Amino acid sequence: MAYDLWYWPGIPGRGEFVRLALEARGIPYRDRAQAGGVEAIVADLRLPRATPPFAPPYLVAEDLVIGQTANILLFLGERHGLAPSDLAGRLWVHQLQLTIADAVAEAHDVHHPVDNGAYYEEQGAEALRAARAFREARIPKYLGYFEDVLAARGDWLAGPRWTYADISLFQLVEGLRHAFPKRMRRVAPDCPRVMALHRRVADLPELETYLASDRRLPFGEGIFRHYPELDAA
Amino acid sequence: MAYDLWYWPGIPGRGEFVRLALEARGIPYRDRAQAGGVEAIVADLRLPRATPPFAPPYLVAEDLVIGQTANILLFLGERHGLAPSDLAGRLWVHQLQLTIADAVAEAHDVHHPVDNGAYYEEQGAEALRAARAFREARIPKYLGYFEDVLAARGDWLAGPRWTYADISLFQLVEGLRHAFPKRMRRVAPDCPRVMALHRRVADLPELETYLASDRRLPFGEGIFRHYPELDAA
């Protein structure tokens, strides 16, 4: 039976990390709120459930309702071979995913540094400061970490083939390049292995159809946003 | 063999979520940087490793080096019965933990909203705004979520006995009460089940010795900080 993926319609956001893993592995799923719209997901979120999600994305898999992006990927990784099956490999890939999740949250907070419930325009001054720190300290720190991992390990983060963490790192780079194109051009030469991994995932035959399809949503008003005033080399 | 826990010395921080789980289950461990100081952990972080942590805390368990708080708890939960062993229960407890981790990160960002590398005093104005949004919107949202879960489930978040997520929710409440005492007094009547869980964990016989010991570090310059100007009812 196909899984049901629920995420806010119209933006890639955190849902895209799940979507990419499902697509890369050819796992059947229904993208419920892309089809049904905001009304559908709001109604679904109101259903009483034994394991209610705090927020989208969540995956309904038969009788399981699984929330938290990294937790969904943990589940998919175990069930569909998107991660090593041994304990050490499983924990390592999850550790990488949680670090990517931290970077994603920080990328979001750049444009919403003081009030998640207010518009960007209401916190533009604070965002200018947050963006500078994120560009100058955090992007190099995160990408430098993954660069070091790849320098020690080779083509992929966790072994001879890609895992959900590699797919997610691709999407993190995609998002950062969208939001901070000047900074990413400046940083790219310092993390050639990360950029090569990004290309390697983009070229995966498993993702070719999806990435060329209109199911692959463009960045917009989600986590990764391009405000020119927040970017600089 | 005892595990080695590595976390910044002198503050409870994210390390405390691991420490509490170890203590509650009576799992032998060495708190390496509490003993060896900052020099010891800085030196340890420089060691070349197959699975390097991005940041403390990390746990060294024989040949495993496990980073990310929630990932360490996933490991301890599976190996030491700190979570259900069935798939649904295991994922549910991890989902709860990741939601707690999100709340912890937001609590930190209140006093460091725009630059993690600068002092609080350099971002006090931004912190005032961030604190207001956190107090008024985020604390009720998070605690309301856990209140609803407990209303549906009973004494504990995931079944007939406590799991690492219950222990972590206790610590989240501890931290919020330290950082935002006025706000937490105001909010407590709206989440009686969360407050009762907090007391239930505080009264666990398994934690009695630890919580009364000087190993239980007071809050200070870590994630949960009490700045009177950031608190209000």
Image (cartoon, coloured by chain):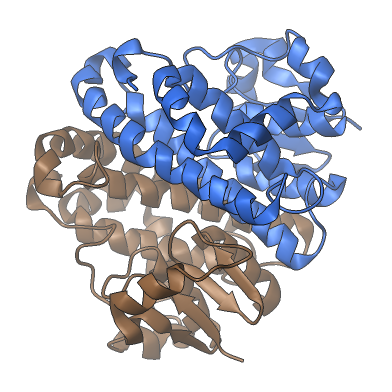
Chain colours: A blue, B brown
How many labels were placed on the picture?
0
Q: Which of A196 and B139 is in front in this view?
A: A196
Q: Where is residue A202 in the image (x, y as percent from the top left)?
A: 72, 25
Question: Residue at 44% across / 31% down in the picture?
Answer: A187
Q: Where is residue A81 in the image (x, y as percent from the top left)?
A: 85, 48
Q: Examine the rendering and report whether any part of residue A14 can be seen.
A: no
Image quarter hosting the C terminus of chain B:
top left
Q: Which residue is drawn at 48% across and 71% down?
A: B18
Vertical order, A178 against A1 (above or below): above
Residue located 41% across and 40% down the image: A140
Q: Is residue B56 above or below residue A23?
A: below
Q: Which residue is drawn at 31% across and 64% down?
A: B174
Quadrant of the image occupied by residue B127: top left
**Residue A157 rendering spot, x and y as whole percentages:** 68, 49
User: Which corner quadrant holds the N terminus of chain B?
Assistant: bottom right
Asked if one can make out residue A161 in the rendered structure from this viewpoint, the answer is yes
Q: In which quarter of the image is residue A10?
A: top right
Query: Foreground: A96 or B27?
Result: A96
